[in-house]
Amino acid sequence: MEPSTGGTAAAHHTEHRIEVAAPLDTVYGLVADVTGWPRVFGPTIHAEQLELDGGTERIRLWATANGAVKTWVSRRELDPGAHRIAFRQEVSQSPVASMGGEWILEALPDGRTSVLLTHDYTAVDDVPDAEQWIAQAVDRNSNAELAALRGAAEGAATAADPEGLELTFADTVEIDGPAEAVREFLYRAEEWEKRLPHVSRVVLREDTPGLQHLEMDTTAKDGSTHTTASVRVALADGRLVYKQLVLPPLLSLHLGCWTLTPTPQGTVAATSEHTIRINPERLALLGEGTTVADAKAYVRTALGTNSTATLRHAKAYAEGTARD
């Protein structure tokens, strides 16, 4: 990510506040665990902890802002005793020239928690409408994040995933071909309409190298067709992670990761991992009497079948490349 260029405009300060019916430590834990943010906050696509030294942490975030995907590195100062977390972007991405803020949590007398999220920012002054763009993005994302935080914290305060709505699973195919060819097959999703029989339509946009918007229609084992839209991030370690922003009605969360691992035999273990959360209000889509367990089994089969098919086609492609 390149530093923003140009001068800077005036500094701005915003505050967003919410009350949460959950204990202070529960709420603080959700804010402090940045690697869990993609599961909690809708705008967050992916998050990684780069360094941790005592109470100082460096993180990289990929998140949507006004429909665009932005990535940045921030330094956070965590104070669990005071239940405060200050953050500051090290290098901002245009039209943001600088941004920081703080999460300030306070216990309320009735066991609830007050959450104050502050931001201070400056805009690049030679970008038209930069201040308006940032103000809108900060307001939209802050409100969405606070609402999601309340939902996650209040659910956790009631019980730890009482219905077992979430499921993580993976499928692996061993490939006797170059990892670069497998990675190319998975990365170039614009070719999937021709390469994968279960994909009938693909629209891919990559305005920034390594950040992809992918919309596609896929056919499930039962013949039903689903339209999904995802943001995919190519990480420096070779993983390709994604988050679905447009989901099938049966899901309220879908995170995925393609990983290629060398084996001692000299082959490549290609793995597709999924984390999903069932939308319990839409169980009837699978028929009356459908349980959460039924829905998880259905989704596991549907996603696993398509992922394995993709990996097997990647295997044929990579092994064919190796023979050429």
Image (cartoon, rainbow, N blue to C red):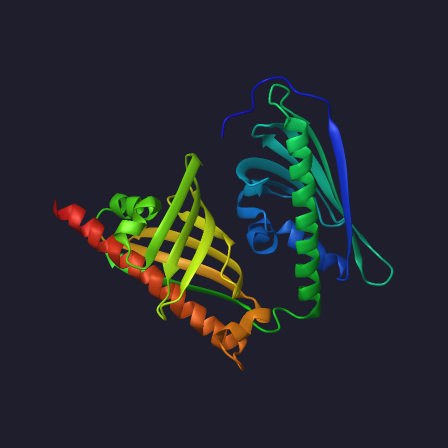
The one nearer the camera, 39 or 287, is 287
The one nearer the camera, 247 or 242, is 247
User: From what the image shows, is residue 219 above or below residue 45?
Assistant: below
Q: Position of residue 139 (x, y in %)?
A: 70, 41
The one nearer the camera, 3 or 195, is 195
Residue 311 sits in quarter: bottom left
Determine the residue positioned at 23% across, 55% down: 315
Query: In screen coordinates, is 55 left or right of 297?
Result: right
Residue 14 sits in quarter: top right
Number of numbered markers: 0
Q: Name the quarter where the C terminus is drawn.
A: top left
Query: In screen coordinates, is 228 left or right of 26?
Result: left
Determine the residue positioned at 51% across, 54% down: 246
Residue 63 sits in quarter: top right
User: From what the image shows, is residue 201 above or below residue 10?
Assistant: below
Query: In screen coordinates, is 280 left or right of 85?
Result: left
Q: Position of residue 138 (x, y in %)?
A: 67, 39
Q: Position of residue 131 (x, y in %)?
A: 67, 28
Q: Residue most toward the right?
A: 109
Query: In screen coordinates, is 261 left or right of 141?
Result: left
Determine the residue positioned at 56% across, 70% down: 282
Q: Position of residue 164 (x, y in %)?
A: 56, 71
Determine the residue positioned at 63% across, 43% down: 54
